[in-house]
């Protein structure tokens, strides 16, 4: 009998679905029965689940993680003439949100260790933006790959300069720092429930968190066409961005097992790091911090060669992200910090994200680890030379 092993999946959503398929079906059928497809009871209940999970003061769901960013910026009346500082090494949505509302995304560099905003770059960009006649209004630090990125230093630079802090937590829902969960850092945090995110639905979805009552009220209004106290009162220009009731129903089932899944993700990441750290640069996790492990990302020379070596063995891997935003055709006309974007330009040549899902089996992990160590040994690659 030949041994058939299924090809490794980059993100395995099927194992999770198998586990809770019945409950999800039931929750969808409930929505079909009551018929409140827009802002049905599951949406409000899921917002309560989010509050219980994050312990933040306000959780406001919306259509997706990109809208969440745009709505947050709109709640500060950000628009033309305003600079919004954005790391160049991130997913495009981080820069798309300010660009959509006519503000100027202003690219800053990241640190090679944390993948996150480099503070000297942020300070320099504040000076640069004023020289260009822009008003520095907000910064969007990104919790890239799942780890909380905010530091006290970043907050104090922002405060000294009257700059709002909008955390793009699209990849970090469930992460924590000093036992405080995502949703409580910066002035506003946003997240995404895109299927491949740590907590994903079966379509698009997003949420906005804040501990500020006034901002929360504005955000609720903006997501619903700028509504006032009555349904047909429109007190500002808003957007139409609601979480579908069916998606909320699905998320209510998924959040029940999410805490356990975070623990499983963490042990998979630790296993990767334990076995790979002598060969490649493995992720550095801050003290008292727990990543949500949206991605497990290594850095090494000969990244492309490793990727094809793995592909030949049916092991998928992905480069997040292959091009810094400052070099993207649609974004290269926006300004960048005068001190340069060296790490944001270097990382796309050396990063590789490996398969990551809570239900990965040890045999699958060992196969990936053995393949990487074999490649590194063949090519004389070790993290010590790095
Ligand atoms: C996924 C993602 C977004 C956008 O979320 P959508 O729900 O797909 O709109 C924004 N920022 C980052 C860093 C992301 O990874």
Image: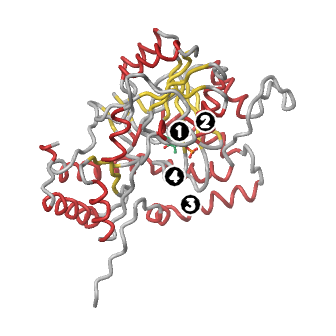
Mark 2 beta carbon near ligand 1 (under 8 Å): yes
Q: Nearer the viewer, mark 4 or mark 1?
A: 1
Q: Nearer the viewer, mark 2 or mark 3?
A: 2
Is the C-beta separation of discs 2 and 3 under 8 Å?
no
Distance (Cα) linking label 2 and label 4: 20 Å
- Where on the picture, by quarter, is residue 120? top left
Distance (Cα) linking label 4 and label 1: 16 Å
Distance (Cα) linking label 4 and label 3: 9 Å
The crowd level at tag 1 (other Cα within 10 Å; few <14, some 14-19, many 20+) is many
Is the C-beta separation of discs 2 and 1 under 8 Å?
yes
Name the mark on residue 191: 1
The crowd level at tag 3 (other Cα within 10 Å; few <14, some 14-19, many 20+) is some
Vertical order, 238 against 349 (above or below): above
Chain-order first, disc 2 or disc 4: 2
The crowd level at tag 2 (other Cα within 10 Å; few <14, some 14-19, many 20+) is many
Q: Which residue occupies 39% across, 49% down?
A: 260
Spot occupied by residue 350 in the image (x, y as percentages of width and height): 30, 47
Q: Which residue is mark 4?
A: 254
Distance (Cα) linking label 2 and label 3: 28 Å
């Amino acid at each position: 009998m030949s041994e058939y092993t299924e090809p490794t999946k980059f993100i395995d959503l099927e194992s999770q679905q198998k586990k809770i398929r019945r409950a999800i079906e039931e929750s969808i059928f409930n929505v079909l029965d009551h018929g409140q497809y827009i802002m049905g009871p599951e949406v409000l209940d899921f917002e309560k689940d989010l509050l219980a999970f994050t312990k933040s003061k306000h959780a406001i769901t919306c259509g997706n993680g990109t809208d969440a960013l745009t709505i947050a910026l709109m709640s500060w009346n950000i628009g033309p003439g305003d600079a919004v500082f954005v790391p160049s090494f991130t997913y495009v949505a981080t820069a798309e949100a300010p660009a959509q509302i006519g503000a100027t995304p202003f690219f800053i560099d990241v640190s090679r260790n944390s993948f996150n905003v480099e503070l000297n770059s942020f300070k320099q960009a504040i000076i640069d933006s004023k020289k260009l006649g822009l008003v520095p209004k907000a910064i969007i630090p990104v919790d890239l790959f799942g780890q909380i990125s905010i530091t006290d230093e970043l907050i104090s630079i922002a405060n000294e300069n009257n700059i709002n802090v909008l955390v793009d937590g699209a990849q970090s829902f469930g992460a924590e720092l000093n036992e405080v969960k995502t949703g409580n850092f910066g002035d506003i945090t946003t997240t995404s429930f895109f299927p491949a995110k740590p907590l994903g639905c079966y379509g698009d979805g997003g949420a906005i968190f804040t501990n500020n009552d006034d901002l929360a009220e504005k955000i609720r209004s903006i997501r619903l066409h700028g509504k006032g106290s009555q349904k047909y009162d429109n007190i500002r220009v808003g957007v139409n961005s609601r979480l579908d009731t069916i998606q909320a129903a699905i998320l209510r089932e998924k959040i029940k097992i999410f805490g356990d899944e975070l623990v499983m993700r963490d042990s998979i990441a630790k296993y990767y790091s334990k076995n790979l750290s002598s060969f490649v640069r493995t992720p550095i996790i801050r003290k008292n911090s727990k990543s949500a492990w949206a991605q497990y990302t290594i850095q090494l020379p000969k990244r492309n060669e490793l990727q094809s070596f793995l592909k030949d063995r049916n092991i998928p891997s992905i480069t997040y992200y292959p091009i810094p935003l400052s070099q993207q055709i649609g974004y290269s006309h926006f300004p960048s910090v005068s001190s340069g974007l060296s790490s944001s330009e270097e990382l796309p040549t050396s990063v590789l994200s490996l398969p990551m899902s809570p239900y990965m089996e040890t045999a699958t992990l060992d196969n990936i680890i053995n393949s990487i160590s074999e490649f590194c040994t063949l090519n004389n690659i070790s993290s010590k030379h790095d």
